[in-house]
Structure formats: structure tokens, C-alpha cells
Image: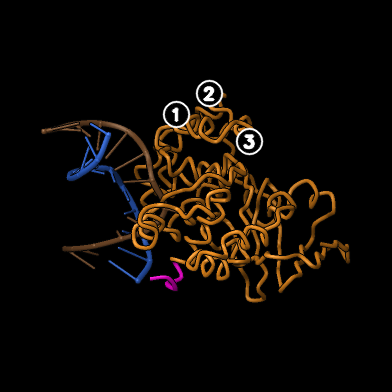
Chain colours: A orange, B brown, C blue
Amino acid sequence: MTITELNGNLILKNIKNFDAAQTLDCGQAFRWSCDADGIWSGIAFGKFLRIKTDNDTAILYNTTMHDFDKIWKNYFDLDRDYGCILESISTHPILNKAGLYSAGIRILKQDPWETLCSFIISQNNNIPRIKGIVERLCMTFGEKTDGGYTFPTAERLCNLTIDDLAPLRSGFRAKYILDAAQKVARGEVDLNSLYTLPYIQARDELIKIKGVGEKVADCTLLFGLGHIEAFPKDVWIKRVMANHFDGVLPECAVPSAGIVQQYLFYYARSGELD
DNA sequence: GCCCAGGGAATCG
DNA sequence: CGATTCCATGGG
């Protein structure tokens, strides 16, 4: 991968397995949207970004080398070799097809609090409505910034009431959002410690929060904390496991289970598997 | 109207 | 332990 700076934009060349549309619209993040020119816009870690990918090139608009090194390189997981992972599952016919179909997906390293809160909202919910609730959460309690609103911190939310959250129309999830905000803001659950804590222990920490079970915890660990061994089992993945794998994940997928999980989720939802 | 959605808590037996 | 049931909301 090479990086060049041009007119305030960054151009990444020879970057493999990175497709903005697949990565940002595969259900791991809920705040990105695409315009007519194929440019994706969103806010993460308090910063607004526009990005477009085309084959092995990516253009990041109106950003700096400093922010790229500090935020976006890590956010888009650009240091990981996904070709190696795709190769490792290529011997299994279904996994191979899922991987080829999803080869532009990168597993994001999102802000852990935003990830936790977003996936609490995701429970028994559909993706368009999750996006709506998350956006109303940001507009109501986030801070105005370039291009929109930031994701509100746990500290901002921890003293609110369920009535305060009524404008979100998040239903029964409101009480879970508040419990998460309180435990995180008080340090009762220390999200930053979960980066390095072993996977099982990190998951047990997250499950202390009301409304957080194994699935929401796994999504937080995978999409926010870099634990690629986490394997979130939602209704789609349960169907794939039952219908195609006899309930057991193929051995070759285990080392990078979370990434393979996202390939399967994306592939299954496309209708190509059935 | 009915069914389902990136589930989890409460309550059974 | 495992299996049900309920939870708010809105799109299809």
C-alpha cells in the first residue's frame, strides 16, 4: 500500500480487499451513507470523513496524514492481510464462495462505546430502523460537528431518564442504553481494558450490562475491540449453521471466526446462499 | 392484520 | 439446565 497526499485528500494505492460499500454497508456500522458519486460519508471518533474506493485504490477526502495514522488506518483495519484469511478458507466450498463474494469487507475497529450502544439497539430489530434510532440518538444528544453529529458519550447519557430517550423511539431498549451508559461512565465496566483482556473474560465483563447477552457482547468485541475470535450468532448465522454446517463451524474458519462470520452474514443476506 | 428484525430477561418446568 | 413468552417499533 502506498499513500500520497493531493489537494488535501489522501490517495491509497495498491490496497487489497477493501471495498467501502461492502465494509460500511454490511451491518457492522450504522452511521455511513453513500451519495450519487459513490462517496461514503460518516462520523467516527468525532471526525467526519468522506471515502471512495475503486478496485485497489481508496480516496479519503478532506483529511490529513495525522488523522489517517491516528484514526482511519486502524478504523478500517488496513494493516491486516485479508488475502491470507481468504486463502485459509478457500478449501471449503461454501466458505470459499462466501469469501469471494465478500472479499472487500474489512472488520472495523469502531469506538467500543458506540459499538456497544449500537448493538444494544440492534436487538430484535432490523437494520434500517437501527440506523434511524442511532441517528436520532446522535442528533438529540451528540455534539454538532462538521458533517453532522458525534455519537454521544456514556457520560452524556448516564444521568438521563427513560422519558428523556423517548424521542429515539427505541422501545424496550431505552432502559438497556441507560444501564450501559451508567456502568461505563462509572467505570463499573471499563471498555478500554477489554482490548487486551482475553476474549472470554472480556465477554463476561460486557454481559454484566442489562440487555447485553452473548450476541451483543460478541458484536462489540468483534466490531469495536478487535477480538476476531468472537463469533456473533444472529438469526441469519444460526440459519446458515443449521442448514449448511450441521451446527459446527468448519475447522479452517476457527482462527478468524469473526471475519468469516461477517462473510457468511453478508453472503446469506444477499440471497446467494439459500 | 400479520410476520419479522444482527436478542435478552423473566419465568417457567 | 432448556424451552417459552414478552418486550416496542416499524417496514414489507
Task: Name the residue at 44% across, 41% down.
Answer: A165
Magenta segment's dominant SS is loop
Residue of label 3: A195
Please tell me which of labels 1 and 3 falls first in the chain.
Answer: 3
Q: Work out how far the residue at label 1 is from the one at label 3, CA to CA, in angstroms.
A: 17 Å
Residue A135 shows up from this direction: no
Residue A177's x, y, as percent? Answer: 45, 38
CB within 8 Å, label 2 to label 1: yes
Q: In this view, does A249 lie above or below A111?
A: below
Helix, strand or loop status at disc 2: loop
Q: Is residue C6 left or right of residue C12?
A: left
Chain letter of the residue carrying label 3? A
Query: What residue range appears in magenta?
Result: A269-274
Q: Is residue A16 above or below residue A67?
A: below
Same chain, labels 2 and 1? yes
Helix, strand or loop status at disc 1: loop
Residue A232 vs residue A100, the one in the foreground: A100
Please tell me which of labels 2 and 3 falls first in the chain.
Answer: 2
Residue A257 vs residue A268, the one in the foreground: A257
Q: Disc 3 marks which amino acid?
A: Tyr
A227 in magenta: no
Residue of label 2: A188
Same chain, labels 1 and 3? yes
Please count the marks in the image.
3
Q: In this view, does A44 lie to the left or right of A165?
A: right
